[in-house]
Structures are given as C-alpha cells and as structure tokens.
Amino acid sequence: MMLCAVAGAQVLHIPDMTWKLWTVLFSSAVFANLLGLNISSAFKTSVAIYILIPVLLIPQMLLSGLVIRFDDLRRPEADHAYGYS
C-alpha cells in the first residue's frame, strides 16, 4: 500500500502527499475488511450476503462521486443564493 501511495504522489507531482494518500488508502482497506467481516458474521447463508452487498455498496458509490459528480448534485441557481459565482 505504501508503494501505491509513493507511486501516486510521484505521478501526480504533489509534494508532501504520500502520507495523506497512504492514510486514505489504509483507512479504506480497514473499513472494507471490517465491513466484510461484519457482513459475514451477521448472515449465515451466502444468498443473504449476495443480496446485501449491493444494498451497502450502491449508496457508497453514489455518495463518493463515482457515479454522479458532486457538481450535478447541487442546483446552479443555489450558487447565487450563497454568493458563489
């Protein structure tokens, strides 16, 4: 994981980004492992787990900006109300 963080910092040419990137990658990996362990301990049949995985992953993908950009979530007319140009 540290190799990914170092390579990403070198490719993006962002100074002092290695530790921040490593922290994000590490926390994502820990959360994914904890989520998988909690799902597998809560449900005993694999069918229930296969049904539950999309229910948990689709909101994560939607809210992370992977499917819908954050700019598309807000209305353009709200920019003027809050003073954004």
Image: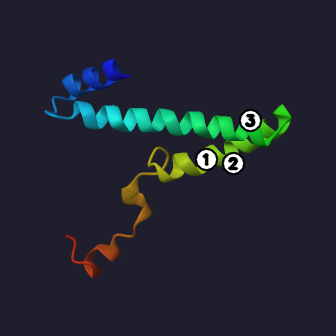
Could you say which quadrant of the image residue 51 lies in? top right
Residue at the image position 33 percent from the left and 22 percent from the top = 2
Residue at the image position 43 percent from the left and 62 percent from the top = 73
Looking at the image, residue 2 lies above or below residue 81: above
Looking at the image, residue 84 lies above or below residue 57: below
| Amino acid type assigned to the residue bearing label 3 in the image | Ser
| Callout 2–callout 3 Cβ contact below 8 Å | no
Q: Where is residue 64? Give x, y as percent.
A: 46, 48
| Amino acid type assigned to the residue bearing label 1 in the image | Ile
Q: Where is residue 20? Give x, y as percent.
A: 27, 38
Name the side, left or right, on which 80 lies relative to 32.
Answer: left
Residue annotated with mark 1? 58
Distance (Cα) linking label 2 and label 1: 6 Å
| Callout 2–callout 1 Cβ contact below 8 Å | yes
Mark in front: 3 vs 1: 3
Residue at the image position 50 percent from the left and 35 percent from the top = 30
Element under disc 1: helix
Looking at the image, residue 71 lies above or below residue 55: below
Viewer-nearest residue: 33 or 51: 33
Mark in front: 2 vs 3: 3
